[in-house]
Image (spheres, helix red, strand yellow):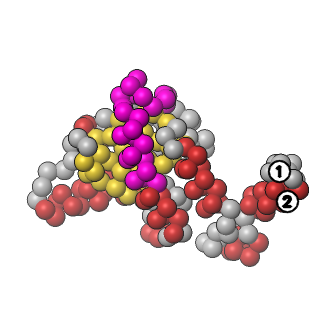
Amino acid sequence: MASPVGPAAGGDAGVDDMWMRRALELAEGAVGAGEVPVGCVFVSNGVEVACGANATNATMDATRHAELVAVDRALRTAAARGAATPDWREATLYVTCEPCIMCASALAQLGLRRCVYGCRNEKFGGCGSILPLDTFPCAGGVREAAAVDLFRRFYDRANVRTEDLATAGDTRAQRRRKAAAAGAGATPSAS
């Protein structure tokens, strides 16, 4: 299960913050591309060895999560250069949202050294929120508010890939706006 960031998690809070900023930049790019805002960067010995952002909408492939996009990119780049693939056992993953069950399982197979994430994944989290599939230390909560804000911005707008939402808008966003107008951000009751 995830632990707070710090020495117990095997990390340096300043370094973790710096690389999480990079992951957030990638997630911002995903939002601009109409993707769920998840970005990630793999770092080994202080060097970025792979990065990615969600590409599920662009590819129409539900497996194109940021982590898998980054791993695939690193493998393709190494093969094209005739170089060695990254040593994942030495790598730390910085990702804006806790890896899902699918990604956590894949990362465990790679032998990842460590994972640092921004916000928890309460529906599909594979690093302890739902299932503890990680065999590597995980630390959550780095730049959590920024990661959550990206999700809110994404889900508060209409999803053009869903016909009903394209015309009606996201009902969660409508409820939030109505609550904000009613007074100081009160959450309306579900109807």
Q: Which residues are magenta?
A: 1-24
| Res 120 → quadrant | top right
Number of residues whose C-alpha sits closer than 10 Å to that of mark 1, classed few (under 14), some (14–19) or many (20 or more): few
Kindly give the residue lying farthest to the front in the view shown.
14
Type of residue at label 1? Answer: Ala
Q: Residue at x 46, y 65 (%)?
A: 29
**Who is closer to the viewer here, 51 or 56?**
51
Q: Is residue 126 left or right of residue 145?
A: left
* Disc 2, SS: helix
| Horizontal and vertical percent position of residue 126 | 49, 38
| Horizontal and vertical percent position of residue 86 | 21, 47
**Who is closer to the viewer here, 78 or 10?**
10
Is 155 magenta? The answer is no
Number of residues whose C-alpha sits closer than 10 Å to that of mark 2, classed few (under 14), some (14–19) or many (20 or more): few
Residue position for label 1: 184
Q: Residue at x 61, y 61 (%)?
A: 154
* Disc 1, SS: loop
| Horizontal and vertical percent position of residue 97 | 51, 47
Residue position for label 2: 181
Q: Residue at x 11, y 59 (%)?
A: 82
